[in-house]
Amino acid sequence: MITVLFSGTTTALLRAIGGRVDGRPFFLGLALFVLGVAGLGFSIFPDIVPFRLTLWAAASSTLSHVFLLIGALIVTPVVLAYSTYHPEIHRGLSSRRAPCV
């Protein structure tokens, strides 16, 4: 199934290159990347290191996953809020540069 999607996306990408819409080749290229990674993942699943280490043998304990989830739930809104507020803080500073000495 992924090979059919990959082939169809490749054909659409080749037709979209040089067209009027600039975003279409970008998103089709992005879709090709995602399909390639998905195809690789499906081809070696459930092995992380092929023929040596499975996904379940490589996973850490449930407690460490919960700890990471709690940390991500706390930090992600802080990063998003700062990224939203950052341009407001620095607006106009580029036009008021210090003189070179």
Image: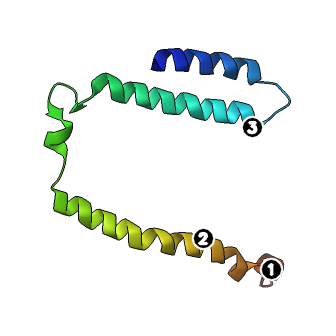
Quadrant containing the C terminus is bottom right
Residue at (55, 69) in percent of width and height: 80
Mark closest to the chain's N terminus, 3 or 2: 3
Kindly report the distance in space between the C-alpha atoms of the residues bearing marks 3 and 1: 30 Å
Query: Marks 2 and 1: CB-CB under 8 Å?
Result: no
For disc 1, the neighbor class at 10 Å (few under 14, some 14 to 19, many from 20) is: few
SS category of the residue bearing label 2: helix
Residue at (57, 32) in percent of width and height: 31
> Residue 12 at what x, y percent from top left?
68, 20
Q: Nearer the viewer, residue 95 or 64?
A: 64
Residue at (17, 41) in percent of width and height: 56
Mark closest to the chain's N terminus, 2 or 1: 2
Residue to which mark 2 is pinned: 83
Q: Nearer the viewer, mark 3 or mark 1?
A: 3
For disc 2, the neighbor class at 10 Å (few under 14, some 14 to 19, many from 20) is: few
Q: Residue type at mark 3?
A: Gly
Image: 44 above or below 69: above
Q: Residue type at mark 2?
A: Ser
Residue to which mark 1 is pinned: 92
Q: Residue type at mark 1?
A: Gly
**Could you tell whether 77 is left or right of 54 in the image?**
right
> Residue 24 at what x, y percent from top left?
73, 33
Mark closest to the chain's N terminus, 3 or 1: 3
Kindly report the distance in space between the C-alpha atoms of the residues bearing marks 3 and 2: 24 Å
Q: Nearer the viewer, mark 2 or mark 1?
A: 2
Residue to which mark 3 is pinned: 23
Residue reaching furthest to the right: 20
